[in-house]
Image (cartoon, grey):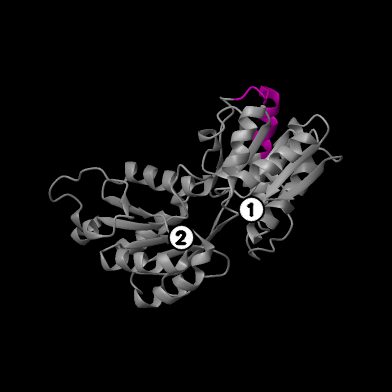
Amino acid sequence: MARLAQLAPMLIGIGAALIPAGAQAQSEVTIGLIQEARPEVEPWSLAWHDSVAAMMKKDPALKVVETFDAYDATRAEPVIRQLLDGGAKVLAMSSFVLTDVAKAVAPEYPDVPMVLTSFGAMVQPNLSSATASYLEIGYSTCWLLTRLSDDGRVGFVGAQEAPFETETLAGCEVGAKAANPSAAITLVNTNSFTDPQANREQVQGLLDQGITEIYLASATEDALGGLRLCESAKARCATWGGDARKWAPTASVLTVVLDWSVVLDGLIDQARNGVTEAKTWDLTFGNKGLTVTDFKTTDAVSPELEAEFNKMIAGLADESIALPESKAHPGYR
């Protein structure tokens, strides 16, 4: 573990509680977390950061080291190897752009449980694949935004039509129609996951059309531009990942939050037990990998609507609400 302190400056240890001498020494686990961006920059990375921070509060023998190079596979690979050679016992790669790197590195470290957020990337014995129910995310978000909309119109701001975006849109369309059969979704795209100004311009275009309920569906860096405009324009907006009230305290009426501890707890158990097994992990409302923010900072949601919303979430959790078959990850919710 001492070698982790010698890693490159781009690696940031986010801390761990002090462990009494001799207590649970065999249970110490360091997670290497490869992030797309710093958590203050995008909801996606914030979700990972908040998940591991909460885990460390519960587990004093857990340490997490974050790095922020996942957008660039060439830069990320040597850092990944540094983490593994330095003693990381679990590796989490939070971007699908690292698929080829993950498949190359995993066989060299078969005893280290690893996870990649991608589709169909599982490789035995140690490279798991993690995703989320984008159908549930889209359904729940657009159900609420449609109920808040006076005319049933909702704006959907995507980025580059990645599989998770198209699946979220599919869920959005079903949820919107469930809330209002006359609902209409207006789709726009920024063509970038990293350009806040492009997102802001697309949101402004929706506002100019009189659409004030807006879903920022990429949940990455570009979403910040739209979130900040939502706040200044007093629009009612939503996204998913980490709590968007960090950027839009009152305009962000909902975030579907991803709790990655559902995945990481399983990998930590594998590391401690010494038995690796690659799995496909799917965050849902049913397994509590998906949760929703409360409505304490907004007056847009009445107590009556909140009760209906909670009933709808329960229906997604127990799967009494039917959804289309997933195209992004067939066989999963």
Residues at badges 1 and 2 in contact (C-beta under 8 Å)? no
Q: Which residues are magenta?
A: 298-312
Q: How packed is label 2: few (under 14 Cα within 10 Å), some, or many (20 or more)?
A: many
Q: Is 305 covered by the magenta stretch?
A: yes
Q: Quadrant of the N terminus?
A: bottom left
Q: Which mark is residue 70?
A: 2
Q: How packed is label 1: few (under 14 Cα within 10 Å), some, or many (20 or more)?
A: many
Instruction: Name the foreground residue: 14 vs 318.
Output: 14
Q: Which mark is residue 134?
A: 1
The image position of residue 218, as x and y in percent, is 62, 50
Instruction: Name the foreground residue: 30 vs 244.
Output: 244
Q: Place residue 150 in its image quadrant.
A: top right
Query: Of helix, strand and loop, which one carries label 2?
Result: loop
Indicate left or right for 272 with 38 as reference.
left
Q: Place residue 69 in its image quadrant.
A: bottom left
Q: Place residue 328 in its image quadrant.
A: bottom right
Query: Of helix, strand and loop, which one carries label 1?
Result: helix
N-term-proximal mark, 1 vs 2: 2
Q: Which mark is residue 169?
A: none
Q: In the image, what residue occupies the spot 70% across and 24% down?
A: 304
The image position of residue 78, as x and y in percent, is 35, 68
Instruction: Name the foreground residue: 196 vs 112.
Output: 196
The image position of residue 202, as x and y in percent, is 70, 44
Q: Is residue 199 above or below residue 303?
A: below
Whether residue 179 is visible to the viewer of this picture, yes or no, is no
